[in-house]
Amino acid sequence: MKRSTFIALTAAALLGLTACSTTTNPSASAMTDSSLNKTLQAFHWDLEKADDASGRALPAFTALAPQRVVRLSFVGGEKPSEQRVVVDKLCNAMGAGYQLKGMDITISRPVSTMMACADTRLMQLEQTVGAQLGRATRVHLAQDANPPRLMLQFDDGSRWHMVGKATAATQYGSAGETLFLEVGPELKPCSHGVMRGAQCMQVREVQYNSAGIKTSTGEWSHFYGMIEGFAHEPGMRNVLRVKRYTRQNPPADASRYVYQLDMRVETERVTPR
């Protein structure tokens, strides 16, 4: 086989952007720094609209909606200095550190992977988001809103208006387990269960050491289910970092696990010789 590599994240990116969510049940009362932070981390925040200091719409941030919606996820760490805000739904993986003091927020300059986007409009959106995010100054969380709503304010008076969607950790009551899965370029017929006769992804687990160096790979097997946020493309080999959650009382003939895409670690096109 002839292989052409498209993406391979560095070890630092591989290990440094691990998502750890905090389960919470937000209170409608006035929030302390801690409870505000827990609420930020309990939801993904999708951008609905952006406006300037005068309230005029800034369509550059929502021009690709609903196909592309900028999503922020606030990720916890053992120390405040390890907290990160991760930007999803764009072309590259993007993240930055953040600190809260009351409702004041400081976000460091974002860093991202360097994959070129096929859609020039998406690349432009990504650059615009990256330039704006580090200028955030304040967060406002609407009380009693269902779903929860967040306004992120910037140093020029502009604002992002965002709506919350519960993270998987919030839905399933745990932070989940991080796995690395290699997904093969071809589908093969499923061999048993309700999916017999359908096409299954070919998957094997990959192990890395603390330096981000691959140490072992498992055996290929059929994958009976789906990975949320990932769509298999024939001819493409991927190594994915996923979060696996355990479902309580899963439906009959359904997996007890839910898999969600966290990051694409490697992507390459594999073509026959």
Image (cartoon, helix red, strand yellow):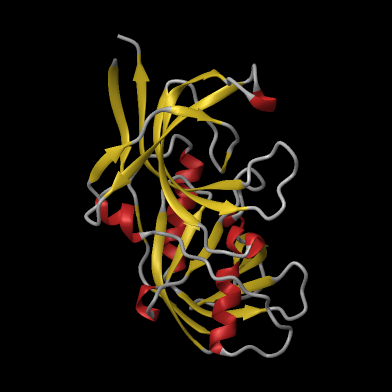
Quadrant of the rendering where the N terminus is positioned? top left
Q: Position of residue 270 (x, y in %)?
A: 35, 21
- Toward which corner of the image does residue 108 lie, by quadrant? bottom left
Left or right? Give the position of 216 relative to 178. left
What residue is shown at x 36% (from left), y 73% (from top)? 82
Asked whether residue 57 is in view, the answer is no
Q: Residue 248 placed where, x, y %?
A: 68, 55
- Give residue 156's position: percent from left, percent from top: 50, 76
Examine the rendered structure and indicate whether residue 136 appears above or below residue 89: below
Instruction: Tell me, yes or no, if residue 132 can be seen here.
Output: yes
Task: Work out whether residue 144 or residue 139 is closer to the camera in this orientation and state it.
Answer: 144
Q: How many marks?
A: 0
165 lies left or right of 223? right
Nearer-the-camera pick, 16 or 158? 16
Instruction: Identify the image quadrant of residue 42.
Output: bottom right
- Of residues 77 and 247, the one nearer the viewer is 247
Q: Taking 172 as reference, is 212 above or below it?
A: above
Above or below: residue 221 compared with residue 144: above
Name the image quarter holding the C terminus. top left
Depth order, front residue of 102/176: 176
Q: Residue at x 35, y 68 (%)?
A: 109
Quarter of the rendering containing residue 41 = bottom right
Q: Residue at x 71, y 48 (%)?
A: 250
Q: Position of residue 159 (x, y in %)?
A: 59, 71
Q: Is residue 70 above or below residue 151?
A: above
